[in-house]
Every structure is written in structure tokens, then in C-alpha cells.
Amino acid sequence: MSLKTYLILFGTGTLLSWAAWAIVLTQMDPNVSTSVSVTAFAVTLGFAVAGTIALLGFGVRAFFGKDPVLFRVLRTSVRQGVVVAVLLEGLLVLQAMRWFAWWNVVPLALFFILLEGFFLAQDQAHERQNR
């Protein structure tokens, strides 16, 4: 699959996720079916945010970056989009449980920062090994 085709499909999926999130937000009543509404809200928002962050990150890295292999840039962007989306979902869970406070948010954010640092270090080690 070419990069252009992949980006078109990825962008279409992201737009569909935003449309699904808008439908969930406007059409579902959380008081009627709480678990279904909350789950649909979280899943659609997670996919939409992950796709948006991944596409924006790819665009910035492709325009300003120096890496000639754009699929490598895409892999990093998608991973970071998923990490940001999972962090956002974690924050929503903390808010739903009424545990959203700085002493809970800071360790969660630090965990994801360290996780991303680990992945970046692995990518650099893999690149050095393949030279």
C-alpha cells in the first residue's frame, strides 16, 4: 500500500470517528443507557483523537523533519497519537471516578512520558544497529 493511499484511508477513518463521536454526543442520552453511552463516547473520542494527533504529527514531521523514510515518521506519529489518546482516556476515567486531581494526573502523565521516551530510545538504538 502506498503512503498516499494509507494517509487517505487513515484520514477518512479519523473523519468517520469524529462524525461518530458527534452522533454519540448529540443523539445518545447518558441517563437512559449509561454504560453504552459512556463506552461509545470514550471509544469514538479515543479513535478520533488518536487519528487527529497522528495525522497532525505526521504532517509536521514530514514538512519540517529530516527523515527521508516517511513510513518511519508515520509509525512514530501513530504511536504518539495512540499514547496521547490513551492518556486522554485515562484522564476521562479519573474524572468519571471523581479522582481527577494533580496527585493522580502527574504520575499518569509521567508514566506516558517515560513510555514514549523508552520507545524513542528503542527507535534510535534500532536505527544505529541498522546503519
Image: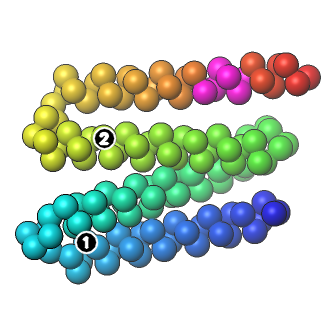
> Which residue appears at 46% of the width and 26% of the height?
113
Part of the protein shown in magenta: 119-124
Q: Secondary structure at mark 2?
A: helix
8 shown above or below 54: below
Q: Secondary structure at mark 1?
A: helix
Q: Amino acid at mark 1?
A: Leu
> Which residue appears at 20% of the width and 39% of the height?
94
Residue 10's quadrant in the figure?
Answer: bottom right
Query: x, y (%) of residue 67?
Result: 80, 38
Residue 122 included in the magenta stretch of the image? yes
Which residue bears the numbered disc 1? 25
Which residue bears the numbered disc 2? 90
Residue 81 included in the magenta stretch of the image? no
> Which residue appears at 73% of the width and 23% of the height?
124
Q: Residues within 10 Å of mark 1 (few under 14, many from 20)?
A: some
Mark yes or no: residue 64 visible: no
Mark yes or no: residue 54 visible: yes
The reply, left or right, for residue 78 in relation to residue 105 is right
Q: Amino acid at mark 2?
A: Gly
67 shown above or below 37: above
Query: x, y (%) of residue 13?
Result: 55, 69
> Which residue appears at 31% of the width and 57% of the height?
42
Query: x, y (%) of residue 85?
Result: 42, 47
Q: Earlier in the sequence, mark 1 or mark 2?
A: 1
How far apart marks 1 and 2 lie (CA) works out to 19 Å
